[in-house]
Image (tube, helix red, strand yellow):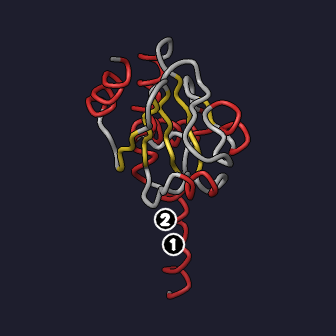
Amino acid sequence: MRKTFIIAACSLMLLACGSNKKNDTENRECTGQQSYERAKGSAKLTADEFRNKVADISKPGWKFLGDKPAVIDFYADWCGPCRMIAPTVEKVAQKYGDKIDVYKVNIDDAPELAQAFGISSIPTIMFVPVKGEPSKEVGALTMAGFERNIEKMLE
């Protein structure tokens, strides 16, 4: 009797935990847990790409290398709030794509960048104007928060 109960319980758990690929994909899209790897509109940067496109952090002082303002999302794949704002970051990239560059930096892949900018909490969004110093916002920004900061950069 006990064996039958255990087998039945395990079977139910397997059925409950099994996932249909289509439903799993829909659930991730619905909850905002899309992978940064499949992002459209933004560009994921390595530390070397950052040094070539944004700023060379090995040199003293800030000198932006881009020709238009940039938004940089410092994130980690394991971070829930980072996954939560991923769709908003993509909407920003689509909405402002001709006016700004939108980049993503995985702090696990580029810890030296996180250290250089004093990033101790994620998500951290850095807003980089063409001239002047960048500003940072920590936490899960709303679309309105992104728009407010971007409009300041574009003035």
Q: Residue at x 57, y 18 (%)?
A: 67
- Along the viewing direction, whichever of 88 and 133 lies nearer the viewer: 133
Q: In the rendered image of this protein, does residue 106 appear above or below residue 88?
A: below
Place of residue 12 in the rendered image (x, y in percent of width and height, measured from the top left)? 49, 65
Drawn side of residue 81 relative to residue 105, left or right: left
Q: Is residue 54 left or right of residue 74?
A: right
Look at the image and tell me whether residue 18 can be seen: no
User: Could you tell whether 150 is left or right of 79 in the image?
Assistant: left
Is 90 above or below relative to 136?
A: above
Give the number of the disc on residue 104.
none
Residue 110 visible, this angle:
yes
The quarter of the rendered structure image containing the C terminus is: top left
Residue 33 spot, x, y in % from top left: 47, 43
Foreground residue among 77 and 141: 141
Q: Which amino acid type is marked by label 2? A: Leu
For residue 12, the mark is 2
The residue lying at 54 percent from left, 67 percent from top is: 11
| Label 2 close to label 1 by CB (< 8 Å) | yes
Residue pointed to by mark 1: 8
Measured from the top left, where is residue 145 in percent x and y?
28, 34
State the SS at label 2: helix
Relative to 113, 88 lies left or right:
left
Q: Residue at x 50, y 87 (%)?
A: 1
**Spot occupied by residue 123 in the image (x, y as percentages of width and height):** 43, 49
